[in-house]
Image: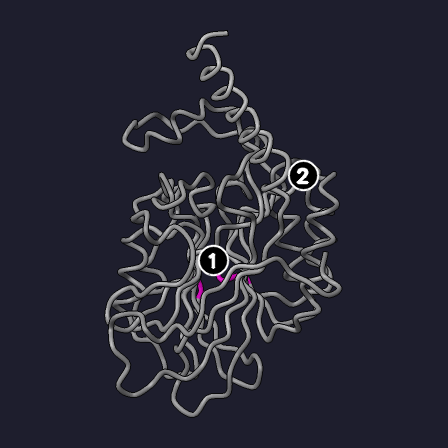
């Protein structure tokens, strides 16, 4: 075999191994990301927020269901779910099994496009070429009303186009949320206006579209939580996310960042994928545990308030 043949064989083998890893290993490498974010009113005690997003649950995904359920061992003060829970007509019971112990804790949620409509097969190249504008064709409708009823029945608050004040971890939280901006269902005017004083002013959305983030920041929210991007899903080491599947810049595809002078943003890389694109590379599925602490009076604007934003697999009893 000549040099070209050996190089072609080696390249083919490497590509095959990479795809096998991305499809068979990394997309099941459940990960907890922790960060400390200085957003609370001065004098507040720390608040532990568990941020879940993009489960894209299929009925048979038992490993994912067990791992999410075990996150209750973290004893969060508040759980925030930013949508895209479903990927199948019969997935509602699986989602509720996964969330079960967490539904005993204070929680809020909004929905994403894949709560309303089932995923459809797509050319993956279209995902990597966001400039290509095509007409959106929805899949079949999913039983999002059943999912909503189960969450609300257990005490979680639906923040879709509403403003709510509640207590979590001994603190007063003012929160508002939007329907999915990815589907252009967001109506920020319904929640716009003066934001009352609270220990934490929280905005919740599925897709972190800049127009939405500008609205929350302009109204003085301390923290906005979002998902949708899957962290890029396919990331290039040293480069990061290739795309975000929205108008958010690639550098914010996952993790904590500043949005303007006052507001912080956390974008979850999520816990699932479309069943028609079941791969992740350099971007394991994740839940976020955010420890919110009081903001310093002289906090700067360079993001230096985040003490750590580490990535690691959950240990102990969480598998």
| Spot occupied by residue 209 in the image (x, y as percentages of width and height) | 33, 50
Locate residue 268, reporting x and y percent: 48, 55
Q: Is residue 206 visible?
A: yes
Whether residue 122 is in magenta: the answer is no
Q: Nearer the viewer, residue 127 or 205?
A: 127
In the rendered structure, the answer to whether residue 96 lies left or right of residue 111 reads right
Question: Which label was assigned to residue 254?
Answer: none
Q: How many marks?
A: 2
- Location of the C terminus (image quadrant): bottom right
Q: Where is residue 213 in the image (x, y as percent from the top left)?
A: 31, 59
The foreground one among 41 and 234 is 234
User: From this viewpoint, which residue is outermost toward the front?
Assistant: 2
Residue lying furthest top in this view?
1
The one nearer the camera, 89 or 64, is 64
What residue is shown at x 36% (from left), y 64% (from top)?
A: 191
**On residue 160, which mark appears?**
1
Is most of the magenta stretch helix, strand or loop? loop
Provide the residue span drawn in magenta.
Answer: 158-162
Residue 204 occupies which quadrant of the picture?
Answer: bottom left
In the image, which is nearer the foreground, mark 1 or mark 2?
Answer: 2
Quarter where residue 157 is shown: bottom right
Q: Do the residues labelled 1 and 2 touch (CB within 8 Å)?
A: no
Residue that appears at 50% across and 25% down: 15
Q: For the residue labelled by badge 2, is the local secondary structure a helix, a strand or a loop?
A: loop
Q: Is residue 118 visible?
A: no
Q: Taking 306 as reference, is 16 above or below it? A: above
Task: Give the CA distance from mark 1 to mark 2.
Answer: 24 Å
Q: What element carries label 1?
A: loop
Which disc is residue 58 wearing? 2
């Amino acid at each position: 075999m000549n040099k070209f043949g050996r190089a072609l064989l080696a390249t083919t083998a490497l590509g095959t191994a990479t795809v096998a890893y991305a499809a068979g290993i990394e997309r099941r490498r459940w990960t907890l990301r922790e960060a400390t974010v200085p957003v609370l009113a001065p004098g507040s005690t720390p608040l532990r927020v568990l941020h879940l997003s993009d489960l894209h649950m299929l009925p048979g995904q038992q490993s994912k269901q067990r791992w999410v359920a075990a996150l209750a061992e973290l004893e969060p003060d508040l759980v925030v779910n930013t949508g895209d829970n479903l990927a199948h007509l019969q997935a509602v019971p699986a989602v509720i099994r996964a969330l079960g112990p967490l539904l005993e804790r204070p929680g809020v949620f909004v929905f994403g496009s894949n709560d309303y409509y089932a995923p459809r097969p797509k050319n993956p190249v279209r995902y990597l070429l966001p400039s290509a504008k095509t007409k959106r064709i929805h899949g079949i409708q999913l039983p999002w009303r059943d999912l909503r009823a189960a969450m609300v029945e257990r005490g979680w608050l639906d923040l879709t186009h509403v403003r709510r004040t509640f207590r979590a971890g001994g603190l007063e939280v003012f929160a508002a949320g939007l329907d999915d901006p990815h589907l252009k269902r967001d109506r920020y005017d319904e929640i716009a206006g003066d934001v009352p004083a609270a220990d934490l002013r929280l905005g919740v959305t599925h897709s972190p579209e800049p127009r939405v983030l500008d609205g929350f920041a302009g109204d003085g929210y301390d923290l906005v939580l979002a998902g949708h991007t899957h962290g890029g899903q396919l990331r290039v080491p040293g480069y990061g996310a290739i795309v975000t599947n929205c108008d958010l810049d690639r550098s914010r595809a996952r993790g904590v960042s500043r949005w303007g002078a006052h507001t912080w943003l956390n974008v979850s890389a999520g816990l699932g994928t479309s069943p028609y694109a079941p791969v992740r590379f350099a971007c394991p599925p994740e839940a976020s545990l955010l420890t919110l602490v009081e903001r310093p009076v002289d906090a700067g604007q360079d993001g230096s308030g985040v003490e750590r934003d580490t990535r690691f697999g959950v240990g102990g009893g969480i598998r």
